[in-house]
Every structure is written in C-alpha cells, then in structure tokens.
Image (cartoon, helix red, strand yellow):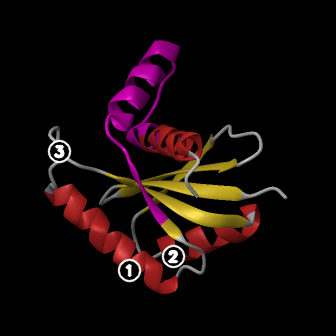
C-alpha cells in the first residue's frame, strides 16, 4: 500500500512544503504556503489531496546541536499542530537544508524566491526522513 508524507520547513512568514510516498521515495516541492490564518485549511487540503499518513516537520538547531529561538518556535508550532491535525507529526533534523537548497537553486541558474528555497528545503527534510526509514 502506498503511504504518502507531507514535509514542512517552518518559518515565521512562509512554510515550505513537499510531498513524497514511501515507494518512489522521491520528494517533490509544492508551492510554499503563508504562515498565517490560511495555513490550517491549506495543510488539511494537502493531507486529504495526497492521502498523507504523517506530517514531517523540519527541526532546526544551532551549529552545535543546541536549541535556538527558531527551535523553540518550531516546538510550539508542532505542539499546536498536533492538537488539530489528524495524522502523526514527526520532527526531522533540518541541519543545512536551507543552505543546500539555495546552493542547488543557484547551480540551476534559474530565478528563485525565498519560498522556493523553503520548499526545496522541505524536499530535503522529507528525503532524509524517508532515508532513515524509522516510521
């Protein structure tokens, strides 16, 4: 049976989004969503549309693995997310994903926006989650 996952790269303004299934294991970037009052409805739509079994959230930490202000923000975000989303929520280390995404977009030589970096970061977060196979 095909199991799909939605990944989120959470920022205070935008949330990068990606989707993949556990068979192909190839994550695809989706358009980023605004981190505002429309987010809940949009995430519910994505979960339903892709029949997602779980939501994977990138977990940021400092260079030495310490918690940062963004770590605390994401922890609070996940706590709230778990109160209304009807699928499991997993944290996945997101170390270096934004830098890797920006470098990849520059390498491609195409015009991109910050939201494109966020969604490509979500792709890397999801690929790491699937590669670990602990779900």
Q: Does residue 38 show up?
A: yes
**10 Å crowding of disc 2: few (<14), some (14-19), many (20+):** few
Decide whether residue 134 is among the magenta residues.
Answer: no
The mark tally for this picture is 3
Is residue 10 depicted above or below 133 in this figure?
below
SS for dot 3: loop
Foreground pick, 36 / 56: 56
The residue at which mark 3 appears reads as 62
The residue at which mark 1 appears reads as 80
Q: Which residues are magenta?
A: 90-117
The residue at which mark 2 appears reads as 40
- Disc 3 or 1, which lies upstream in sequence? 3
Left or right for 45, reference 94: right
SS for dot 2: helix
Of badges 2 and 1, nearer the viewer stands 1
Decide whether residue 99 is among the magenta residues.
Answer: yes
Q: CA distance from mark 2 to mark 1?
A: 11 Å
Residue 92: x and y, percent?
A: 42, 52
Left or right for 32, reference 114: right
Left or right for 113, reference 63: right
Tell me, for residue 94, which label it has, or none.
none
């Amino acid at each position: 049976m095909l199991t799909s996952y939605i990944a989120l790269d959470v920022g205070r303004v935008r949330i990068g989004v990606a989707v993949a299934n556990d068979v192909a294991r190839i994550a695809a970037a989706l358009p980023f969503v605004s981190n505002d009052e429309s987010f809940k409805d949009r995430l519910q739509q994505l979960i339903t549309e892709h029949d997602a079994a779980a939501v994977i959230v990138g977990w940021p930490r400092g260079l030495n693995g310490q918690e940062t202000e963004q770590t605390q923000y994401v922890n609070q975000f996940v706590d709230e997310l778990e109160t209304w989303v009807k699928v499991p929520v997993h944290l996945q280390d997101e170390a270096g994903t934004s830098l890797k995404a920006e470098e990849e977009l520059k390498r491609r030589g195409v015009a991109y926006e910050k939201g494109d970096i966020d969604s490509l970061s979500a792709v890397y977060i999801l690929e790491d989650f699937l590669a670990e196979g602990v779900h």
